[in-house]
Image (cartoon, helix red, strand yellow):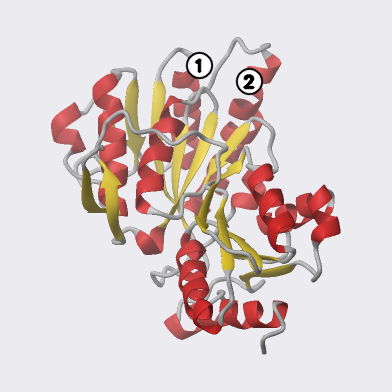
Amino acid sequence: MSEKKLMSLRDAINLAMSEEMRKDEKIYLMGEDVGVYGGDFGTSVGMLKEFGEKRVIDTPISEAAIAGCAIGSSMIGLRPIIDLTFMDFITIALDAIVNQGAKSNYMFGGGLKTPVTFRVASGSGIGSAAQHSQALEAWLCHIPGLKVVAPGSVEDAKGLLKSSILDDNIVIFIEPKAQYNKKEEVTLDPDFYIPLGKGKIKREGTDLTIVSYGRMLERVLVAAEEVSKDGISVEVVDPRTLKPLDKDIIIDSVKKTGKLILVNDAYKTGGFIGEIATIVAESEAFDYLDHPIVRLAGEDVPVPYANVLENAMLPSVEKIKDAIYKVVNKK
Protein backbone atom coordinates (compact mmCIF):
# COMPACT_ATOMS: atom_id res chain seq x y z
CA MET A 1 0.00 0.00 0.00
CA SER A 2 1.33 3.44 -0.94
CA GLU A 3 2.63 5.66 1.83
CA LYS A 4 0.44 8.60 2.79
CA LYS A 5 1.14 11.89 4.51
CA LEU A 6 -1.06 14.55 6.09
CA MET A 7 -0.72 17.70 4.00
CA SER A 8 -2.62 20.82 3.05
CA LEU A 9 -4.28 21.45 -0.29
CA ARG A 10 -1.59 24.07 -0.93
CA ASP A 11 1.21 21.55 -0.38
CA ALA A 12 -0.53 18.80 -2.37
CA ILE A 13 -0.73 21.09 -5.40
CA ASN A 14 2.94 22.01 -5.00
CA LEU A 15 3.86 18.32 -4.79
CA ALA A 16 1.80 17.38 -7.85
CA MET A 17 3.47 20.05 -9.98
CA SER A 18 6.93 19.22 -8.71
CA GLU A 19 6.54 15.48 -9.33
CA GLU A 20 5.54 16.04 -12.94
CA MET A 21 8.24 18.66 -13.57
CA ARG A 22 10.87 16.22 -12.30
CA LYS A 23 9.67 13.67 -14.84
CA ASP A 24 9.48 15.94 -17.90
CA GLU A 25 11.62 18.98 -18.69
CA LYS A 26 9.01 20.22 -21.17
CA ILE A 27 6.72 21.08 -18.23
CA TYR A 28 7.12 24.57 -16.79
CA LEU A 29 5.23 26.84 -14.38
CA MET A 30 4.38 30.43 -15.25
CA GLY A 31 2.36 33.20 -13.63
CA GLU A 32 2.38 36.31 -11.50
CA ASP A 33 4.51 35.87 -8.34
CA VAL A 34 5.02 32.11 -8.82
CA GLY A 35 8.81 32.34 -8.46
CA VAL A 36 10.44 34.54 -5.84
CA TYR A 37 7.22 34.99 -3.87
CA GLY A 38 6.18 31.33 -4.13
CA GLY A 39 2.70 32.02 -5.48
CA ASP A 40 0.03 34.39 -4.19
CA PHE A 41 -1.46 31.47 -2.25
CA GLY A 42 1.88 29.80 -1.50
CA THR A 43 1.37 26.92 -3.92
CA SER A 44 4.82 27.17 -5.56
CA VAL A 45 7.06 27.81 -2.54
CA GLY A 46 10.51 26.30 -3.14
CA MET A 47 9.94 25.51 -6.81
CA LEU A 48 12.10 28.33 -8.15
CA LYS A 49 15.05 27.01 -6.15
CA GLU A 50 14.57 23.45 -7.43
CA PHE A 51 13.74 24.10 -11.08
CA GLY A 52 15.32 27.47 -11.82
CA GLU A 53 14.04 30.62 -13.48
CA LYS A 54 13.72 29.05 -16.95
CA ARG A 55 11.04 26.66 -15.69
CA VAL A 56 9.43 28.74 -12.93
CA ILE A 57 8.71 32.05 -14.61
CA ASP A 58 7.46 35.24 -13.00
CA THR A 59 5.38 37.25 -15.47
CA PRO A 60 4.10 40.81 -15.86
CA ILE A 61 0.56 41.50 -14.65
CA SER A 62 -1.15 40.62 -17.93
CA GLU A 63 -3.33 37.54 -18.01
CA ALA A 64 -3.92 38.03 -21.74
CA ALA A 65 -0.18 37.88 -22.42
CA ILE A 66 0.31 34.93 -20.05
CA ALA A 67 -2.42 32.89 -21.75
CA GLY A 68 -1.18 33.73 -25.23
CA CYS A 69 2.38 32.77 -24.35
CA ALA A 70 1.21 29.53 -22.73
CA ILE A 71 -0.92 28.41 -25.65
CA GLY A 72 1.73 29.38 -28.19
CA SER A 73 4.45 27.48 -26.35
CA SER A 74 2.19 24.43 -26.01
CA MET A 75 1.80 24.33 -29.79
CA ILE A 76 5.54 23.83 -30.19
CA GLY A 77 5.76 20.96 -27.71
CA LEU A 78 5.95 22.46 -24.21
CA ARG A 79 3.47 21.69 -21.42
CA PRO A 80 2.79 24.87 -19.41
CA ILE A 81 1.18 25.03 -15.99
CA ILE A 82 -0.30 28.51 -15.58
CA ASP A 83 -1.15 29.99 -12.19
CA LEU A 84 -3.80 32.62 -12.96
CA THR A 85 -4.42 33.17 -9.24
CA PHE A 86 -8.01 34.42 -8.82
CA MET A 87 -10.47 32.75 -11.17
CA ASP A 88 -12.00 36.16 -11.92
CA PHE A 89 -8.87 37.04 -13.92
CA ILE A 90 -9.53 34.29 -16.44
CA THR A 91 -11.94 36.75 -18.05
CA ILE A 92 -8.90 38.71 -19.31
CA ALA A 93 -7.41 35.55 -20.83
CA LEU A 94 -10.52 34.20 -22.52
CA ASP A 95 -9.67 35.21 -26.09
CA ALA A 96 -6.53 33.08 -26.11
CA ILE A 97 -8.21 30.23 -24.24
CA VAL A 98 -11.61 30.15 -25.96
CA ASN A 99 -10.97 31.48 -29.46
CA GLN A 100 -7.48 30.08 -30.00
CA GLY A 101 -6.43 27.22 -27.75
CA ALA A 102 -9.76 25.44 -27.43
CA LYS A 103 -10.23 25.36 -31.21
CA SER A 104 -6.74 24.47 -32.47
CA ASN A 105 -6.77 20.70 -32.07
CA TYR A 106 -10.13 20.46 -33.86
CA MET A 107 -9.26 22.89 -36.64
CA PHE A 108 -6.00 21.12 -37.43
CA GLY A 109 -7.49 17.62 -37.40
CA GLY A 110 -5.79 16.65 -34.16
CA GLY A 111 -2.40 17.83 -35.35
CA LEU A 112 -1.96 20.89 -33.13
CA LYS A 113 -2.30 20.00 -29.47
CA THR A 114 -2.52 22.58 -26.65
CA PRO A 115 -1.53 20.83 -23.40
CA VAL A 116 -1.96 23.77 -21.01
CA THR A 117 -3.19 23.54 -17.41
CA PHE A 118 -4.69 26.78 -16.13
CA ARG A 119 -4.85 26.73 -12.34
CA VAL A 120 -7.48 29.11 -10.92
CA ALA A 121 -8.39 29.90 -7.30
CA SER A 122 -12.17 29.92 -7.21
CA GLY A 123 -15.01 31.08 -5.04
CA SER A 124 -15.51 33.03 -1.86
CA GLY A 125 -14.58 32.39 1.76
CA ILE A 126 -11.57 34.62 2.40
CA GLY A 127 -13.13 38.08 2.19
CA SER A 128 -11.88 38.93 -1.29
CA ALA A 129 -15.10 40.73 -2.31
CA ALA A 130 -16.95 40.98 -5.60
CA GLN A 131 -14.07 41.08 -8.10
CA HIS A 132 -11.96 38.29 -6.58
CA SER A 133 -14.48 35.67 -5.38
CA GLN A 134 -16.38 34.33 -8.37
CA ALA A 135 -16.90 30.73 -9.45
CA LEU A 136 -17.12 30.82 -13.25
CA GLU A 137 -16.94 27.15 -14.18
CA ALA A 138 -20.24 27.23 -16.09
CA TRP A 139 -18.77 29.65 -18.65
CA LEU A 140 -15.84 27.34 -19.29
CA CYS A 141 -17.82 24.11 -19.41
CA HIS A 142 -19.81 25.67 -22.27
CA ILE A 143 -16.78 25.67 -24.60
CA PRO A 144 -15.90 22.57 -26.69
CA GLY A 145 -12.20 21.82 -26.47
CA LEU A 146 -11.79 22.70 -22.81
CA LYS A 147 -11.71 20.31 -19.89
CA VAL A 148 -12.78 21.54 -16.45
CA VAL A 149 -11.67 19.87 -13.21
CA ALA A 150 -13.06 20.74 -9.76
CA PRO A 151 -11.64 18.62 -6.92
CA GLY A 152 -13.27 18.71 -3.51
CA SER A 153 -10.62 16.87 -1.49
CA VAL A 154 -6.88 17.25 -1.03
CA GLU A 155 -5.88 13.83 -2.36
CA ASP A 156 -8.18 14.20 -5.35
CA ALA A 157 -6.55 17.55 -6.09
CA LYS A 158 -3.13 15.94 -6.25
CA GLY A 159 -4.15 13.02 -8.46
CA LEU A 160 -6.32 15.11 -10.77
CA LEU A 161 -3.75 17.89 -11.19
CA LYS A 162 -1.12 15.36 -12.27
CA SER A 163 -3.52 13.93 -14.87
CA SER A 164 -4.43 17.45 -16.02
CA ILE A 165 -0.78 18.31 -16.63
CA LEU A 166 -0.40 15.23 -18.83
CA ASP A 167 -3.57 15.87 -20.83
CA ASP A 168 -3.15 17.10 -24.40
CA ASN A 169 -6.01 19.59 -24.12
CA ILE A 170 -6.49 22.85 -22.23
CA VAL A 171 -7.56 21.99 -18.70
CA ILE A 172 -9.06 24.53 -16.32
CA PHE A 173 -8.11 23.28 -12.86
CA ILE A 174 -10.30 24.85 -10.18
CA GLU A 175 -8.91 25.21 -6.66
CA PRO A 176 -11.26 26.28 -3.82
CA LYS A 177 -9.30 29.18 -2.37
CA ALA A 178 -11.00 28.93 1.02
CA GLN A 179 -9.52 25.46 1.48
CA TYR A 180 -5.82 25.96 0.76
CA ASN A 181 -5.10 25.25 4.44
CA LYS A 182 -7.35 22.18 4.56
CA LYS A 183 -5.37 19.04 5.46
CA GLU A 184 -5.99 15.41 4.52
CA GLU A 185 -4.01 12.23 4.03
CA VAL A 186 -2.42 12.24 0.57
CA THR A 187 -0.78 9.42 -1.39
CA LEU A 188 2.92 10.14 -1.88
CA ASP A 189 3.46 7.77 -4.79
CA PRO A 190 4.71 9.95 -7.70
CA ASP A 191 2.85 7.64 -10.08
CA PHE A 192 -0.52 8.22 -8.37
CA TYR A 193 -2.99 9.62 -10.91
CA ILE A 194 -6.77 10.03 -10.95
CA PRO A 195 -8.21 9.89 -14.48
CA LEU A 196 -10.22 12.85 -15.72
CA GLY A 197 -13.90 12.16 -16.29
CA LYS A 198 -14.29 9.66 -13.45
CA GLY A 199 -16.53 10.64 -10.52
CA LYS A 200 -16.60 9.06 -7.07
CA ILE A 201 -19.23 8.09 -4.52
CA LYS A 202 -17.99 9.88 -1.42
CA ARG A 203 -20.71 8.44 0.80
CA GLU A 204 -23.06 5.53 0.16
CA GLY A 205 -26.78 6.09 0.78
CA THR A 206 -30.27 4.96 -0.14
CA ASP A 207 -32.75 7.79 0.57
CA LEU A 208 -31.38 10.73 -1.40
CA THR A 209 -28.58 11.66 -3.81
CA ILE A 210 -26.61 14.88 -3.42
CA VAL A 211 -24.19 15.87 -6.18
CA SER A 212 -21.60 18.46 -5.25
CA TYR A 213 -18.00 19.41 -5.97
CA GLY A 214 -15.25 21.77 -4.89
CA ARG A 215 -15.67 23.71 -1.66
CA MET A 216 -19.31 22.72 -1.11
CA LEU A 217 -18.51 19.00 -1.03
CA GLU A 218 -17.19 19.31 2.52
CA ARG A 219 -20.40 20.96 3.71
CA VAL A 220 -22.53 18.35 1.98
CA LEU A 221 -20.64 15.54 3.71
CA VAL A 222 -21.07 17.23 7.10
CA ALA A 223 -24.79 17.68 6.49
CA ALA A 224 -25.15 14.05 5.36
CA GLU A 225 -23.45 12.84 8.52
CA GLU A 226 -25.65 14.99 10.76
CA VAL A 227 -28.97 13.94 9.18
CA SER A 228 -27.92 10.30 9.47
CA LYS A 229 -28.65 10.68 13.19
CA ASP A 230 -32.29 11.08 12.17
CA GLY A 231 -32.20 7.92 10.09
CA ILE A 232 -31.71 9.60 6.71
CA SER A 233 -29.27 7.85 4.38
CA VAL A 234 -27.70 10.32 1.93
CA GLU A 235 -25.56 9.27 -1.02
CA VAL A 236 -22.96 11.90 -1.92
CA VAL A 237 -21.61 11.94 -5.48
CA ASP A 238 -18.54 14.01 -6.37
CA PRO A 239 -18.11 14.31 -10.16
CA ARG A 240 -14.56 15.65 -9.62
CA THR A 241 -14.35 16.50 -13.33
CA LEU A 242 -17.12 18.73 -14.70
CA LYS A 243 -16.04 18.30 -18.29
CA PRO A 244 -15.89 15.51 -19.25
CA LEU A 245 -18.65 14.69 -16.77
CA ASP A 246 -19.21 11.20 -15.40
CA LYS A 247 -22.92 11.13 -16.21
CA ASP A 248 -23.37 7.44 -15.45
CA ILE A 249 -22.36 7.69 -11.80
CA ILE A 250 -24.96 10.45 -11.27
CA ILE A 251 -27.75 8.74 -13.21
CA ASP A 252 -27.17 5.41 -11.48
CA SER A 253 -27.27 7.05 -8.05
CA VAL A 254 -30.53 8.88 -8.81
CA LYS A 255 -32.10 5.65 -10.06
CA LYS A 256 -31.07 4.09 -6.76
CA THR A 257 -32.43 6.82 -4.44
CA GLY A 258 -35.19 8.54 -6.43
CA LYS A 259 -34.30 11.99 -5.12
CA LEU A 260 -31.68 14.58 -6.11
CA ILE A 261 -30.23 17.73 -4.56
CA LEU A 262 -27.48 19.65 -6.37
CA VAL A 263 -25.10 21.96 -4.49
CA ASN A 264 -22.42 24.40 -5.61
CA ASP A 265 -21.13 27.85 -4.65
CA ALA A 266 -21.46 29.47 -8.08
CA TYR A 267 -24.38 31.77 -8.90
CA LYS A 268 -27.62 29.86 -9.27
CA THR A 269 -28.76 31.34 -12.58
CA GLY A 270 -26.95 29.55 -15.40
CA GLY A 271 -24.82 27.56 -12.95
CA PHE A 272 -23.34 24.20 -13.89
CA ILE A 273 -25.62 22.28 -11.55
CA GLY A 274 -28.47 23.33 -13.85
CA GLU A 275 -26.75 21.32 -16.59
CA ILE A 276 -26.57 18.31 -14.27
CA ALA A 277 -30.29 18.68 -13.52
CA THR A 278 -31.05 18.68 -17.24
CA ILE A 279 -28.89 15.62 -17.88
CA VAL A 280 -30.86 13.72 -15.22
CA ALA A 281 -34.19 15.01 -16.55
CA GLU A 282 -33.29 13.83 -20.07
CA SER A 283 -32.14 10.38 -18.89
CA GLU A 284 -33.86 7.22 -17.79
CA ALA A 285 -33.33 8.40 -14.21
CA PHE A 286 -36.18 10.89 -14.66
CA ASP A 287 -38.76 8.11 -14.32
CA TYR A 288 -37.23 7.13 -10.97
CA LEU A 289 -37.61 10.58 -9.41
CA ASP A 290 -40.34 10.90 -6.79
CA HIS A 291 -39.52 14.54 -5.89
CA PRO A 292 -38.56 17.58 -7.99
CA ILE A 293 -34.82 18.17 -8.35
CA VAL A 294 -33.56 20.80 -5.88
CA ARG A 295 -30.68 23.23 -6.52
CA LEU A 296 -28.73 24.98 -3.76
CA ALA A 297 -26.29 27.59 -5.02
CA GLY A 298 -24.88 31.05 -4.45
CA GLU A 299 -27.32 33.96 -4.52
CA ASP A 300 -27.40 36.00 -7.73
CA VAL A 301 -25.53 38.96 -6.23
CA PRO A 302 -21.90 40.12 -6.39
CA VAL A 303 -20.00 38.41 -3.58
CA PRO A 304 -20.03 40.78 -0.56
CA TYR A 305 -16.86 41.72 1.31
CA ALA A 306 -18.44 41.54 4.78
CA ASN A 307 -18.01 38.07 6.24
CA VAL A 308 -21.57 37.77 7.52
CA LEU A 309 -22.99 38.70 4.12
CA GLU A 310 -20.53 36.48 2.26
CA ASN A 311 -21.67 33.53 4.36
CA ALA A 312 -25.34 34.43 3.90
CA MET A 313 -25.19 34.16 0.11
CA LEU A 314 -23.85 30.59 0.10
CA PRO A 315 -25.33 27.17 0.88
CA SER A 316 -24.51 26.44 4.52
CA VAL A 317 -24.61 23.11 6.32
CA GLU A 318 -27.93 24.16 7.87
CA LYS A 319 -29.43 25.13 4.50
CA ILE A 320 -28.35 21.79 3.06
CA LYS A 321 -29.86 19.93 6.01
CA ASP A 322 -33.13 21.85 5.67
CA ALA A 323 -33.31 20.89 2.00
CA ILE A 324 -32.66 17.23 2.84
CA TYR A 325 -35.43 17.16 5.45
CA LYS A 326 -37.91 18.75 3.04
CA VAL A 327 -37.08 16.38 0.20
CA VAL A 328 -37.44 13.26 2.34
CA ASN A 329 -40.50 14.71 4.13
CA LYS A 330 -38.98 14.43 7.59
CA LYS A 331 -39.66 18.04 8.62
Mark 2 secondary-structure assignment: helix
Name the disc covering residue 75, or none: 1
Question: Which x, y percent locates residue 203?
Answer: 50, 60
| Mark 2 burial class by Cα count in 10 Å: few <14, some 14-19, many 20+ | many
Up the image or down, 199 lies above or below 184; here it is: above
Residue drawn at x 26%, y 39% is: 15
Query: Can the viewer see residue 40 in this picture?
Result: no
| Alpha-carbon span between mark 2 and mark 1 | 9 Å
Name the disc covering residue 104, or none: 2
Residue drawn at x 64%, y 30% is: 145
Decide if residue 215 is on the left or right side of residue 252.
Answer: left
Q: Which of the two residues, 34 or 43, is positioned nearer the viewer here?
A: 43
Query: Can the viewer see residue 71 in this picture?
Result: yes
Are discs 2 and 1 less than 8 Å apart at CB?
A: yes
Mark 2 or 1, nearer chain start: 1
Mark 1 secondary-structure assignment: helix
Q: Which of the two residues, 137 or 52, is positioned nearer the viewer here?
A: 137
Name the disc covering residue 287, or none: none
**Quadrant in the picture for the C terminus:** bottom right
Question: Which x, y percent locates residue 248?
Answer: 68, 43
Question: Which x, y percent locates residue 29?
Answer: 32, 32
Decide if residue 147 is on the left or right side of residue 279.
Answer: left
Residue drawn at x 27%, y 21% is: 23
Q: Which picture quadrant has residue 166?
A: top left
Total marks shown come to 2
Outermost residue on the left side: it is 49
Q: Amino acid at mark 1?
A: Met
Q: Amino acid at mark 2?
A: Ser
